[in-house]
Every structure is written in C-alpha cells, then in structure tokens.
Amino acid sequence: MKTRKLDAIIVYGDREHFGNITYLSGYDPRFEESILIVGKTNLPILLVGLEGIAYAKRIAQIHAQNRVVPYFSLMGQSRSKSMKPKEPSDLFREAGIKRGMKVGVAGWKHYTQDDFTRSSLAIEIPSYLIDALRQTTGSRTNVTNANDLLTDPENGLRNTHSVNELAAFEFAAATCSRQMHNLIMNLQDGITEYEAVQLMKLNGMPLITHIMLSSGERARVGLCSPSDRRIKRGDPLTAAFGVRGSLVCRAAYVVEKENELENIQPDYLSKICIPYFKLLATWYRSMKIGASGNEVFNTIERQAHSLGLKLALNPGHFIDLEEWTNSPFYPGSPYILKSGMMLQSDMIPLVPPPKFGVNVEDTIALADEKLQSSLRNQYPEMWHRIEKRREFMISRLGLSLNPEILPLCDNAAVLRPFLLAKHMALTQS
C-alpha cells in the first residue's frame, strides 16, 4: 500500500471468488458477499451478511471489526429495523475513507493494456460498490484495481509461500493424489460416473473446483460433472479433483490393452501418449528457480510442435486456494520463477474428434536450499514424502528433476495410457 501510495484497500469476496479475502483474513464466504477494508491505522473491518457473522467470528484469523451488512445477505432474508441497511458510501465513510483518498480494490482479477486502455480503472466487483467508492473519494481515478498486489506473477503476495503454507498445501496435494489413485485402482467398466466418484473416498475438505468426471463423448469437454451414465470399456474418460491448494487430473481410455483401441484410435499410444509423456518430462526438466516464463513457454511450444502436439492453454500456472491464480508461462513473459512458488503442470493437448487426448496434472513447489532446510526441520514427515516422490520420479519414471523441485502429489507425472491396466505407466529410459 505504501509503495502504491494507497490510503486503503477494499478486498471483495463471494462464494466463488473467496481466495484473496481468505488469504488475508482466514474467512471464506460460504453463501454471501463480503468485504475486508484495510486502512493505514485502524483495525481491519470485515463486512459480511447475516449468515457470515457467526462464522466470521469463529473462523477469521485476524483482529478485525466484524459488521453485518444486510444487503450482503441472501435474497428474502431479514432487513429489520434493528439492522437498517446503510448506503455503501456511508459504510466506507465510517471506515475512514474520505474525499481525496486513494483506494485500491482487490477482487479476483486485474487487467493489462491488452485488455483495456486504462486497465487500472477496470474493476470487476459489483458496480454499486465501485460507484459508492468513487463517490466517497470524489474521483473515478482515486479508485484503482489493486488485485495485482496479491496475484501478479512477479510480486503478488499469494504466489510465493511460506514453510507453513507449503506444509498445508502438501497435505492438500497428497490428499488429492491419493483420492485420484483410489479412483483409478478401483475403476471398472459398467459402473456409473456417480459410482466412479464414490471410489475416490472423498473426505470433505473444501474443494478448489467442481468435481469433474465424464466418460464417452462428454469426456472430450473435460469440465463436465458426473452423471448416471455407465462407463463402458473403450470409453475415453476424464477425471479431475482438487481441494484448496492442489488439483489432480487424469484423462485416458478405459481399456486394459492397446489392441482394444484398434478400431477406435490405433495410434493412441504412439501418437498421443508417448509424445505427451516426453513433453511432460521436458516440463519437469524446465522447472527451476531463475527460469523465465517466456523461456519455459518457448521450450514447451518448440517440443510440442516437434512431437506433433498442440496445447490448448498455457503450459502450467500458479495454484493456491484457487486452481489458477495466474500464469507466468506465455509468449514474452518477463516473469522469473522463484523459491516458494507452487506450480501446476497443466498441458492439455488439442486432439480433434473422434480421437481422444490424454492429460496428467499435478502440483509441485520450488524451494531453494534455505526453504528446503526449514521444511526438513519443521516438517520431517512431509520432507520424507517429498524425497520418496523424487526418488520414484527419477529412478522409476526416468525423469530429470532439478534439486529445487518438490513434488507435492504422490503420483506426480504418472501417466497410465490404459486405465484398466492398473500397474502400467509410461517411463523414460
């Protein structure tokens, strides 16, 4: 705030866009809108709806003034006289925001000049709040987008992590990978997609995204939720599951042997899976402290082209409480990979129908010697798991890993081309 010469920051959150407000306060909106007001001197003020007030008092991890804003509540809930709604401008003035002040707003996005000419003035939270802020400060230009302070690839607070954060997210990643492992080890043809999800043995941890599992034609979309469709032998299948801090995805065919694909996609192993695994190996080899996002992007793009693959999105991104906070991997990216960053392998090959692709997504962290030493001393069991994962990836999968790569998922980079061949995976000699 001092660097940006801001007098206050307004952090907005709702059920879908909770990451910034949760990171700063520990409070995650379960049903309603909420705002955290952070000024220079006073205690932070947490404005929540009716259902959020008791939860905020219980769950928030900062000293803040908790207040109810009736119109943040769900429609139809009480707006009684004892809780007479105040105009947003009144709330902001009571929080100490005055005419002439500079106020930053953090919702869940910030923009560049590729998006808007005056990108700092483009703010995605509800207009009635922005209108009131600009009225209170007296100028449109006094209220600017400050989300980059949290999720910018270079300086965003949420894209580098402490020892304790990495330990919490390793727990999330281990949970995700084991639940995906449960699915694959117990998958069989003839069960419904709903029954397949039950094989994961989910434990109720807060999700990072909807559970995605689909078979047959719907599997080509990838984002679909499960249905009562029965999974048939020979079907393509996509499954993705994530809790806050990690996501794991797998996509392949529900077969046991390559010859089962003779009449479906006979070159699936040679033209899709093996090239993809080579590309995955390159991605892991490219992850290192000091590498630039542009360098990684160009390396992956060149090899993908040489292998006959084309990717749908960026070759990876940051991951945190949300599945995708930002990505440093794009053409011309100036951003440098640092210690403490958590990254998601997320390379989705474009394969035109009726053929099907493959997908392997897992979570890693980068840590220099100092951070590794802290993890080793404070979380020895976690460190032992990381060492075993590295050993497996190097000695069994044949991957080259820089010393700073910390695999957070148990089955990182494990590509099973045939989902019914439970103990078969690709390796690199």
Image (spheres, rainbow, N blue to C red):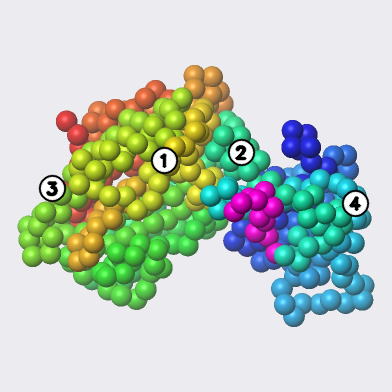
**Of callouts 3 and 4, the N-terminal one:** 4
Disc 3 versus disc 2: distance between alpha carbons? 41 Å
Identity of the amino acid at label 3?
Ser
Q: Which residue is mark 1?
A: 331
Disc 3 versus disc 4: distance between alpha carbons? 66 Å
**Of callouts 1 and 4, the N-terminal one:** 4
Q: Is residue 79 left or right of residue 181?
A: right
Residue 246, given in percent of the width and then of the height, sits at 47, 47
Q: Is residue 129 left or right of residue 353?
A: right
The 10 Å Cα crowd at callout 2, few under 14, some 14 to 19, many 20 or more, is some
Q: In this orientation, which residue lies closer to the viewer: 217 or 259?
A: 217
Q: Which residue is mark 3?
A: 270
Identity of the amino acid at label 2?
Gly
Residue 251, quarter of picture: bottom left
The 10 Å Cα crowd at callout 4, few under 14, some 14 to 19, many 20 or more, is some
Residue 317, given in percent of the width and then of the height, sits at 45, 43
Instruction: Provide the secondary structure element on which disc 1 rests.
Output: loop
Q: Residue at x 39, y 56 (%)?
A: 240
**Of callouts 2 and 1, the N-terminal one:** 2
Specify the quadrant that holds the N terminus.
Answer: top right
Disc 2 versus disc 1: distance between alpha carbons? 20 Å
Q: Which residue is mark 4?
A: 99
The 10 Å Cα crowd at callout 1, few under 14, some 14 to 19, many 20 or more, is some
